[in-house]
Amino acid sequence: MKWLADSKRLAVQTLNRPQTALDIFIADSDSGQASHLIREIDDGWVSVHDDLYFLDDGERFVWRSERDGYSHLYMFDMQGKLLHPITKGEWALRQSGGARGMSQAVSYIDESTASIYFTSLRKASTERQLYRIGFDGDDLQRVSAADGFHSIRFAANGEYYLDLSSAIDRPSTLVAHSTDSDQARTIAEVGRDIPERFDFQNWELLTVNARDGYEMPAMMLKPRYFDVEKRYPSIIYVYGGPSAPTVRNAWQSGTRGYYNQLLADSGVIVFFVDNRSAAGKSKIDANTIVKQLYGEVELNDLLDGVAWLKSQPYIDTDRVGIWGWSGGGTMTLQSMTSSSEFVAGAAVAPVTDWRYYDTIYTERYMKRPQDNEEGYDATSHAKRAADLHGRLLLVHGTYDDNVHPQNSWAFSDELIEAGITFDMMIYPMRKHGISDDAAQRHIFTTMFEFWQRNLGLGD
């Protein structure tokens, strides 16, 4: 819901159960009478967002839509008639910054100059850059200068904005910019000394082709003193969820970022690759997984990435592992039950059957179980547990209210029935993130020791 500028009318968005049709109504706050404004439809699902802006002239509004297969801005009149597209092309707007939990790609609308500031993937799908464009769709300009990932927050009056940015080779900086001039002031440089202080290795951004030629973003971290004549074990980190890329031209910070450096220092090549539905380039790509979430489409792309990795002369093809958290744990189980490419894998808080996950997320992609029984069965990794290849470490928190522990219980029970031994680590009273300091130290130590045993680190 969103108030119009007159504070007398309210815009209300409704979504049907399959999430394939979104309607916007204008409701009068006094009478309660509502009139239909527009309908957004999609064969897969309509992506819900917060980019709906009613202009002060009372005659037009701006709306973000994926109706042409890419996320773009459109201008409508107040009768719901499309006036014209504002942005267009084979690239997409993507949210960056803004309030927590809100999906806003529009950073600011300046009605005095009839221009819109927004963040998008126009430069590269692995980056977020700030752009400006006129209401009429003319004069598109890139505003942010540095390569990398930019999170933008504008002041309410639009006079300045904060830009928190980083790149794969540059820790975060927070800079205040004047909107109407070149004036800028650096407020903070976060962890500027960390790369040199800890002598971090540099990531490489890559592109790997899928079997049909689709260009998948990828990144690699090689060991210190890398020798192309040697053969190294490799660990692939995955997530794979719809429009949720892991490959970004952004600084790899936090526990997982440092953990990857630890692995590289231990002689491991760390590899990320985003399947097409995860890369977030377009709704066309995302819709390839309708009714088969974490199914054949994602698996084929991942295996194509693995094939490329194993074709490199410096990879020990007998020592390749995989791990992921949440959806990444799901994809780990998917790849280990549907292929024999991995000698070991660690699945943290995985969904093992979509019947166990929450309705609004699951049905967005899978629809109702009674309408897609075949799809639910095909993507049930618990049903394929007996086909597990490689050594598995299964991890879950007992208080996980996102991916409920029954997912791991179901998978582990099937392994027991099949007589397959495995490793399991349960974190009492921890939720989905297993996020307290003690548990974080423990889980990453546990995984490291798992890799030592099963990938022969240091051999």
Image: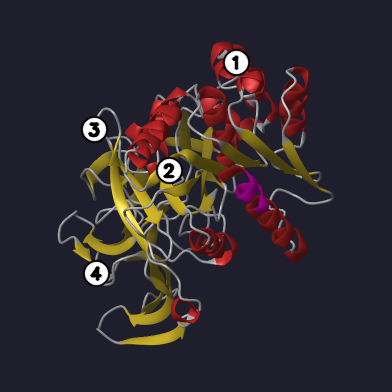
Element type where label 3 sits in the image? loop
Name the kind of residue labelled 2 in the image: Asp
Neighbours of disc 4 within 10 Å: few (<14), some (14-19), many (20+): few
* Three-letter code, disc 3: Gly
* Location of residue 39 with respect to 377 vertically, above or below: below
Q: Is mark 1 on a helix, strand or loop?
A: helix
Q: Name above or below for residue 126 compared with residue 33.
A: below
Q: Is mark 4 on a helix, strand or loop?
A: loop
Q: Earlier in the sequence, mark 2 or mark 1?
A: 2
Say which residue label 1 marks: 377
Q: Which of marks 3 and 1 is in front?
A: 3
Would you name the residue on which mark 2 appears? 316
Earlier in the chain: of badge 4 and badge 1, it is 4
Asked if residue 364 shows in the view, the reply is no
Q: Position of residue 151 (x, y in %)?
A: 42, 66
Q: What stretch is highlighted in magenta?
A: 449-453
Choose the circle earlier in sequence order: 3 or 4: 4
Q: Earlier in the sequence, mark 3 or mark 1?
A: 3
User: Nearer the observer, disc 4 or disc 1?
Assistant: 1
**Residue 188 vs residue 68, the one in the foreground:** 188
Upstream in the sequence, badge 3 or badge 2? 3
Q: In which quarter of the image is residue 150?
A: bottom left
Q: Identity of the amino acid at label 4? A: Thr
Q: Look at the numbered discs 3 and 4 and tell me whether their residues touch, using CB distance below 8 Å.
A: no
**Residue at the spot x=53%, y=32% of the render?**
15
What residue would you read off at disc 3?
Answer: 213
Q: Distance between the residues labelled 3 and 2?
A: 25 Å
- Label 2 crowd (10 A; few <14 / some 14-19 / many >=20): some
Give the percent coordinates (x, y) of residue 75: 28, 48
